[in-house]
Amino acid sequence: MPVYSIGVDIGSTCAKLAVVEDGRTLVHQMVMPTGWSSAETAQAIYDQLERQGYCPDSSPCVATGYGRLNVPYAQKTVTEITCHAKGAAFLFGTEACAIIDIGGQDTKVIAMADGVVQDFLMNDKCSAGTGRFLEIMANTLCVDPGTLCELARRGSGVSISSMCTVFAESEVISLIGSGTAKEDIAYGIVESIVNKVASQYGKLSVPGDRCYLTGGLCESPYILESLSRTLGLTVTSHPLARYAGAIGAALTAHGLARSERRTSV
Amino acid sequence: MSEYQLPAQFEEFSQARKEGFLRAKAIKDSGGHIAGTFCTFTPCELMDAAGVHPVSLCGMSPEPIPAAEKDLPKNLCPLIKSSYGFAVSDTCPYTYFSDLIVGETTCDGKKKMYELLGRMKDVYILQLPQGIDRSYALEMWTKELHRFKAALEEKFNVTITDQALREAAELRNQLRQARTALMELQKLDPPPFTGLGLYKLLDGLGFSFDLHSNLKKLTDLTAQLQADYAAGARPVPPGQKRILVTGCPIGGVLEKTVKVVEENGGVVVCFENCGGIKPTRYLVDTQAEDIMSAIAQRYLNIGCAVMTPNSQRMELLPQLVEEFRVDGILEIELQTCHPYTVERYEIKKLAHDMGVPFLALDTDYSQSDVGQLTTRIAAFIEML
């Protein structure tokens, strides 16, 4: 009988679920907005699992992401750093690479060798260079984040100098007020994020030159192009890379005996 | 009736703080003197020999920071702001009752803060050399100690004899050795103490003025822990990752750093910073012909990032990593502490060369980064 292991990744913006069969095959994934209560979100995921015929109470389950402590049916919590690395190794079939995860609240750069995290960096307290930054700017431009990224491809010439999201928003509003084209503003916004990520990347010593993007922006070709250009290497991704954290959690769960008491590592 | 008055808002204070005030007041009422200090470079032997009780005034609480920010910039080290805030708000018993505040020219923020503190309190500043590589560093620091000695003698109307200095140095040496012995129990695997418990205990002793009783407490506790351990007591479970903490003073951020380490599969086996090993390993040569120079020499061995170059720290860290069988180095830095945040580069390189994983955290006394710090610390321990 196959063993299903469950990974729940409650991020600041989106919650992701992954179910892995026998520690090898991804059989189910789902994403939903986290909303205001990660406990309610965890319950919604629980219901979804039951609807799909999985049993969250008797299957091995690991929770990750900033809401990881609010998943009562998980036996164990593991940080998103470790989970993203594991998930990336699974999706990209490599054990030595750099992983960039542009998350809602945190942007992480992870160096992995032999399938194990060697070193990592997270953005400081502020939200510069994160998904939240992009979201707020997209809101100001009245587009969704995906559209903003594609608009950026056709723009040029604008640079957003404020690192602080609140100041950057005022900067964008003044650009709008002065009649700057939306594409050019979008270009400036993406450049700002990519430069911030690149400066984090530069601080980490990374084994080899393979670099993968995980998280919610994995399906934006322009973000990948812009990151590749700025870092001077080819950054690639995977359509399922937004689930990297959840997949990593499910893989970690595989092999946990269900009788184990819930613990933190 | 006592000539010493409690601050106006005394009744609003917590019980622990009220007790602190009453203890400090009792010392003053019985004719004793209190000198507030801020640093492990403060030559406490001189104060002991003058019959003055030294006590650390390093602010570890966010509470008085708003009061400090009326005079100080927001973008400053939280320890400096907290220390100053306690003084302006009359909320720290030891600052309030101190007869003298002793500072050194350590970091720039502290130096300039002492100048402002001088408007409210009697402040004496020792000029600490900026490094120990000059041939005259010891001579200069010894002269500073002589100048300080004369100032103490004048202020408190006492004569500090060589004999009293030697006795004070002897007792301080014993205290340092006792602290070292207790901290070195953490070399055991698993260690007999959580890092948090150890740090709080050592920190607490600084507010008890009976040095002989402190010495006894330390030696008794060390013996007790050894006996319990031999009898099979293992308060820390085996297999926890052994962490060395280095960097800034951490009394104000213990809960969101050390405690988080110990809730996420780690145990702090060694504190290299100023509350830990750094200032305890070097002793005063009490038999030296010139006791003042011998005291001065001891303090110059302290490997703080205010020194340039800071070769003492670079030599001590690898020794500690080996002695305490450290799995990972955690550098805890306070916001805008330029000496430590810039020196991080060298420490990171040192850790890399030793093959020991390294994580640096930059934080302050607020609660705003607790979530992110927890994720970083937990991920670091998962990685070990």
Image (cartoon, rainbow, N blue to C red):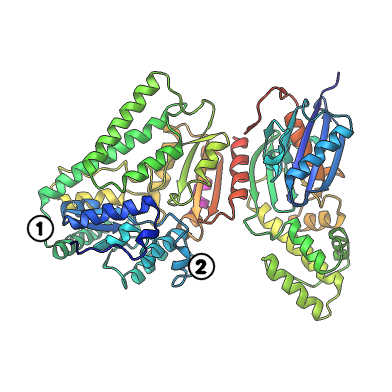
Rate crowding at label 1 as few (under 14), some (14 to 19) or many (20 or more) other CA atoms within 10 Å.
Answer: some
Q: Secondary structure at mark 1?
A: loop
Q: Which residue is mark 1?
A: B159
Rate crowding at label 2 as few (under 14), some (14 to 19) or many (20 or more) other CA atoms within 10 Å.
Answer: few
Answer yes or no: are tags 2 and 1 on the same subunit: yes
Residue A192 vs residue A177, the one in the foreground: A177
Q: Can see residue A207?
A: no
Q: Is residue B289 left or right of residue A87?
A: left
User: For the residues marked 2 and 1, what is the alpha-carbon distance in whole angstroms?
Assistant: 43 Å
- The answer to which image quadrant residue A22 occupies is top right
Residue B312 x, y percent position in the rendering: 37, 47
Amino acid bearing label 2: Lys
Residue A74 x, y percent position in the rendering: 72, 33
Residue positioned most to the bottom? A178
Q: Which residues are magenta?
A: B343-348
Residue A119 x, y percent position in the rendering: 63, 43
Q: Is residue B138 left or right of residue A58?
A: left
Q: Which mark is residue A41?
A: none
Q: Is residue B345 magenta?
A: yes
Q: Can see residue B338?
A: yes
Quarter of the image with the C terminus of chain A is top right
Question: Cβ–Cβ below 8 Å for labels 2 and 1?
Answer: no
Q: Secondary structure at mark 2?
A: loop
Counting labels gives 2
Q: Which residue is mark 2?
A: B74
The structure residue drawn at horizontal position 51% and vertical position 56%, both measured from the top left corner, is: B364
Q: Chain of mark 1?
A: B
